[in-house]
Amino acid sequence: MNKNINANRATLLISCPERPGIISTVSNFLLEHKANIVHFDQHTTDPLAGIFFMRIEFDMNHFDESFSKLKEDLPEMAREYSMEWKLSGKGERKRMAIFVSKMDHCLLELLWRWKSKELEVDIPLVISNHPDMREVVEGFGIPYHHIPITPDTKAEAEQKSVELLEGKVDFIVLARYMQILSPSFISKYPNRIINIHHSFLPAFVGANPYARAFNRGVKLIGATAHYVTNDLDEGPIIEQDVQRVNHRHTAQDLKIAGRHVERQVLAQAVAWHVEDKVIVHGNKTIVF
Ligand SMILES: Nc1nc2c(c(=O)[nH]1)N[C@@H](CN(C=O)c1ccc(C(=O)N[C@@H](CCC(=O)O)C(=O)O)cc1)CN2
């Protein structure tokens, strides 16, 4: 359950060079701004010369006034400790776009969780390079945009997506979307595009991982949710899981078994992103 939707709840994410006194400084800063800490997590990569990560959830009475003052004063503290930070709160519902091709299982998992209010986001639109999912998506009352793609029209098609998304979404989920996004597109949403790859990365990067896994005779199949970067399927991993398989399984059996893993892994990664539980550092994530 995303507690950020709590009217008086806010979340602060911090990354900075490790040094003594960070926790004390941040907790005093919050106290001075009338914030009551509800959850507190931190991680240090290397106490001697590492990076310090922190996630704090806090409540504020008289939220609007206190939150505004906190937001105004935060940069000064951040400068002193060379902090990168992200502050969100007051029920700010994130706006999620979904990209899909022909497969429905990951799309439906997200839509079911949205409809049941488990996933507390807004979904302004779904974009697809195929018409197949129109009826499903419009059945949930969500606009569906079919933008066909061929090798010759890829750039033009992507520009149409850019225009549809402009100012409407905070992040994008690729729910088995089978088109490689351009660096230009990705640059507009840094660490804000989540993909589900249907293998336990780094195994079987790229297309047709189940067929390659079957040919390799694997005993585990898996799925990986990661942020999208220009390096195909090599972005920061958010969540993974696996499922045992054996010699009796056909390649099709692997695909069917894999679908259950994919949808759970993707939904968990999206939930953690929505709840501001993920910090990206380099090509890795810290998930609180
Ligand atoms: N820039 C990135 N784009 C995408 C990524 C990524 O990591 N970086 N992940 C993919 C999803 N994906 C595997 O999970 C994947 C999808 C598609 C392909 C591919 O070869 N697509 C071909 C077209 C295939 C078709 O038309 O059916 C292509 O785009 O030329 C590989 C991996 C989503 N995008």
Image (cartoon, grey):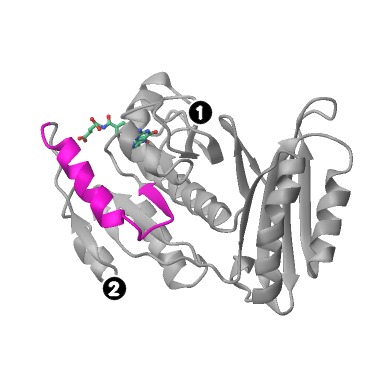
Horizontal side, residue 134 vs residue 48: left or right: left
Q: Residue at x 58, y 30 (%)?
A: 282
Q: Tag 1: Cα neighbours inside 10 Å, few (<14), some, or many (≥20)?
A: some
Residue 31 visible, this orientation: yes
| Residue at disc 1, secondary structure | loop
Q: Secondary structure at mark 2?
A: loop
Residue 251 appears anywhere in the view: no
- The image shows residue 180 at horizontal and vertical percentages of 29, 34
N-term mark: 1 or 2 = 2
Question: Which of the pair 165/226 is nearer the observer?
Answer: 165
**Magenta stretch?**
152-174
Asked whether residue 167 is drawn in magenta, I would say: yes
Residue that appears at 61% across and 47% down: 278
Quarter where residue 185 is shown = top left
Whole-percent x and y of residue 153? Answer: 12, 37
- Mark 1 CB lies closer than 8 A to ligand 1: no
